[in-house]
Amino acid sequence: MKLPASLLLALLMTLPTPPSNAAAAPPAAPPATAPDAARKPHPVTAPFGATREDEYYWLRDDDRKDAAMLAYLEAENAWTDAVMAPLKPLQDKLYDEIVGRIKQDDSSVPYRERGWWYYSRFERGKDYPVHARRQDGPGIDALSIQAANERGDFAGEQVLLDVNAMAEGKGYFSVGDYAVSQDNRILAWADDAVGRRQYTIRFRDLETGRVWPETIEGVSPNLVWADDNRTLFYVENDPETLLTVRVKKHVLGTPVAQDALVYEEHDDSFYMGIGRTRDDRFVTIGVESTVASELRYAPAADPRAFTVLAKRQRDVEYDADHLGGRWVIRTNAPGADGRPATNFKLATAPSDATSRAQWSDWLAHDPGVFIEEFELFDGFTAVAERSGGLERIRLLKADGSQQYVAADEPVYSMGLSVNAEPDSGWLRYGYTSLATPATTYELNVATGERRLLKQQPVPGYDPAKYVTERVWVTARDGAKVPVSLVYRKGLRKDGTAPLFQYAYGSYGISMDPGFNSPVVSLLDRGVVYAIAHIRGGQEMGRQWYEDGKLLKKQNTFNDFVDVTRELVKLGYAAPGRVAASGGSAGGLLMGAVANQAPADYRVMVAQVPFVDVVTTMLDESIPLTTNEYDEWGNPQERRFYDYMLSYSPYDNVRAQDYPALFVGTGLWDSQVQYWEPAKWVARLRDVNTGTRPVVFRTNMEAGHGGKSGRFQRFREQAEYYAFVLDQLGVAEAK
């Protein structure tokens, strides 16, 4: 299925703006001591009778209006301000360095679709992107458009969305998706002005500029047009749980209240998405849980009746696309021998398929190769795979031959880029490493010619000054854990350097070794940067994920700690100069490791951390809970309850010396609710016997991804970088 155009531009959203020259308000008098939240008895009881005391449960307010709760968060922010005040010069210096390595008026690589070239660009000094397009014609291609944008020549450009103008006067603003009708005339987009990921759909005629009066609220950012150019499919969210529950269709110019229900999902463990197939023949509705999938399809020319491609079955996952009169399906479904394709395989099926009995294996399952995704072309198929902990792209040609896209370094990240037109003989792909900025190439599959379309400009950066490598660490149970490293040339591996170790380790999400411009500020101060590819991700294939979830979740934490200890042993770092960082489920990792191995870390950063596992997973009203029973377990069952309780960070805080901690959250976070880190910090303050600072920053106008706009994002990063470097005893760049 085709990706929404705006989602393909996500990387550009991280470009920063310069600091404001407005005079700052005089600082308030700093608090003398850290906040001490009130403790109020509140038992939390599981269905089978087990009871836990949650003395900070009162900090939860779903409406975000409770005065006492807000006062506590503001007090924590004031304490963080006081602790961070002496580091303000370092924070400003880091910010200036990060901004200095960014080309502020950069743009994305244009791609062509239905006679138009689409791209996004930023203007110097502005927070948000401009989404635009140019009509195809003689002499118009990706390189010529990039050159025009570089010159500031926007003649012939049609602005679709100037997000700067749309966001004016708002503390938060995000365009989650936009879609242009098949006749290229009508624009639909979904925006969020709160950060709660509840979007509103709006419409504009691109020829006349007219904005339709109707708006559709409470939706997911996922929009698909039918062929009539008047009917838009969208996904409606549950207002309480925020789960994607219904697909509806809106006919432009008609009352939203009359929008027809197309499909409703009654199983709360499934997510939902919509799309169009590669050949534009079908509109699709896909639902998936952690362990099962189901896809429906209807003719885009007349999408009234949807047909199920194959009924859902537990432990059978699949996704599918259509081109050349057949479905191509990526699946882990068992073969004729009854053995599941753990690392996935490719199958094909006729256009009118309705069951797995009609599927035929095409690319066989390989236990050493994980198939991640694929892209269909008229003359070949591109398959994104993983092998040996690294990504690669395999090309399946029409004549039955195969080839691999070459990599330029031993440790890298490679993946499919925007390939909007299936009749192209050129494959676009992205390439990067910890030392190589993000690069977009296109490869002629027939001739082997490779063209550089764009490399992320990084002013002042010289990749020759840095070294990237891969090491393997043997975990305590014998598993071999890959670790990607980057550091400045000249590093002496004598056990004196500081280390910044990052990981995620959940949902099968892989953390690949890609270039991260702000990290250069760490490297230039002699810090070694490491990504630990721990179990729970999918870097080593599907089993790597299976071995880091449910009743094997402890492997995730053990892997992280074992990597740290081995890197110290190998001389990459000093034992007292190790920093650790993770966010969301990676924040769970930080919380668990802080409890289990606090002496191995001097400082930790936990952003939007999922730290109150048991209470959250017992509460089905909280977004994501029911979808994730197959990731964490359902604590209504005693075995999962007990296992979760054994590692849940909030429940395992105890009297010991903790590392310095920088904890961040957003008041409007819909993924990990703000009260989880708030309660965790409050309990840490009660029992922490150490003297290292614990600071807690709540962004009062943000959700799970932090503040919108690129200025604030890099201000926040400079703040916790300053905190980390101070704890590691590092300040000056080399």
Image (cartoon, rainbow, N blue to C red):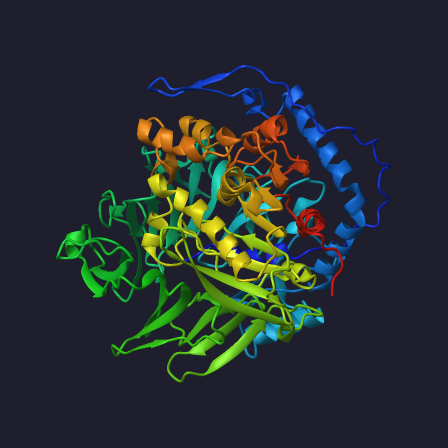
- 49 or 596: nearer the viewer: 596
| Point 57% across, 72% down: residue | 454
Q: Is residue 666 above or below residue 502?
A: above
* Quadrant holding the C terminus: bottom right
Specify the farthest residue to the left.
337
Where residue 545 appears, x then y in whole percent?
A: 36, 50
Q: Quadrant of residue 41?
A: top right
Residue furthest to the top in view is 41
Along the line of sight, the residue nearer the viewer: 498 or 53: 498
Report the quarter where the N terminus lies: bottom left
- Tell me if residue 309 comes above or below residue 148 in the rendering: above
Which residue is at 37% across, 65% downward? 388
Where residue 72 appears, x then y in whole percent?
Answer: 67, 25
Quadrant hosting residue 374: bottom left
Q: Quadrant of residue 194?
A: top right
Left/right of residue 40 with respect to residue 474 in the rendered view:
right
Q: Is residue 218 above or below residue 448?
A: above
Which is nearer the eye, 224 or 501? Answer: 501
Q: Please indicate, yes or no, whether residue 301 appears anywhere in the rendered image.
A: no
* Left or right, 144 with reference to 731: left
- Does residue 445 sit above or below 491 in this rendering? below
How many numbered badges does the structure rendering display?
Answer: 0
- Residue 101 position, x and y percent, is 70, 64
- In the image, 613: left or right of 361? right
Q: Is residue 595 visible?
A: yes
Percent position (x, y) of residue 499? 60, 56
